[in-house]
Image (tube, rainbow, N blue to C red):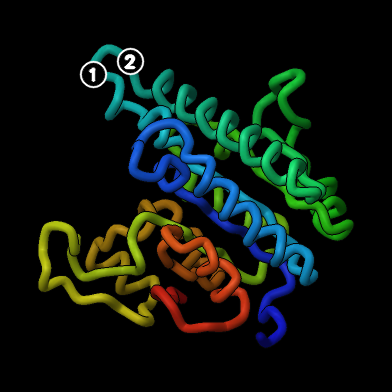
Amino acid sequence: MEKPVAKRVLIKISGEALAGEKKTGYDFDIVSRVCETIKACADEGVQIGIVIGGGNFWRGVKDGAGKVERVSADRMGMLATVMNCMAVCDVFRQLGASARVMTSVDIQGVGERYDTRRSVEALERGEIVLFAGGTGNPFFSTDTAAVLRALEIGADAILLAKNIDGVYSDDPRVNPAAEKFDVIRYEEVLARRLAVMDTAATSLAMDNRIPLDVFALAEPENIRRVLHGEAIGTKVF
């Protein structure tokens, strides 16, 4: 297999993907396979930051049943991402990888407070850094947090590992005739309102011209394949 095509990347992992068919909580078979693949990439010299969604525990106002207002719901979602980062970090450590959790908000005893300089220093030492708590602000998704952290650490690309194997013209689970794109520009994603990332995240990535690879996490080896330049999923630029 060829050498990795990127030196430093930000991997955004769907929280729901970590739950597998259970939909909530964790499928630790999947979590372990994901961590083993990412560790193998780190062992090849790729510097890896990770943002994990919280949808396997809480999906903000969607789960609030009209009883939890938006700011509280979003902060609950931030806590869900912290739990996910803690769990995944422990799996990395059991595999012998050096990993740490950095949080966007102060949570004593959980992880250290996010700092760009310290996170880059950790990456350069070969540590896997998990960025928890989203941006630390309500009204911003973990998609936006992923793009923001990628830009802050100077990542070469964002890898978006989802429950779907790329970007489609429509939801392929509803419309079997939906077209899958191999390559697409951010401008078209926004113009067609395609469900890749939320609008704020897509605009931020477009304005800063950071490439995005979208692929399915169902086969964790896809992470390594993308990092070695294989054309799977969809490339957005």
Q: Hey, which residue is sitting farthest top in the picture?
A: 67
Q: Position of residue 216 (x, y in %)?
A: 41, 63
The residue under the point 34% across, 37% down is 23
Determine the residue positioned at 32% across, 68% down. Answer: 167
**Residue occupying the point 71% across, 64% down:** 40
Tell me which corner region of the image, top left, top right, bottom left or bottom right, holds residue 147: bottom right
Q: Quadrant of residue 217?
A: bottom left
Disc 1 and disc 2 in contact, CB within 8 angstroms = yes
Lateral position of residue 78 relative to residue 178, left or right:
right
**How many discs mark residues in the rendered view?**
2
Expressed as whole percent of the image width and height from the top left, the position of residue 201 reads 45, 54
- Which amino acid, mark 1? Ala
User: How many C-alpha atoms fall within 10 Å of the one at disc 1: few (<14), some, or many (≥20)?
Assistant: few
Q: Can you identify the residue that label 1 sits on?
A: 65
Residue drawn at (75%, 18%) of the image: 108
Residue 160 at x, y = what percent? 48, 60
Q: Please tell me whether mark 1 sits on a helix, a strand or a loop.
A: loop
Q: Is residue 179 left or right of residue 213?
A: left
> Of the numbered discs in the image, which one, if any, rests on residue 235?
none
> Between marks 1 and 2, how big is the CA–CA gap?
7 Å
What's the amino acid at mark 2? Answer: Val
Q: Which mark is residue 68?
A: 2
Screen quadrant of the N terminus: bottom right
Badge 2 element: loop
x%, y% of residue 155? Answer: 67, 65
Q: Nearer the viewer, residue 231 or 73?
A: 231
The answer to whether 19 appears left or right of 211 in the picture is left
Category of crowding for the residue at label 2, using alpha-carbon neighbours closer than 10 angstroms: few (below 14), some (14–19), many (at least 20): some
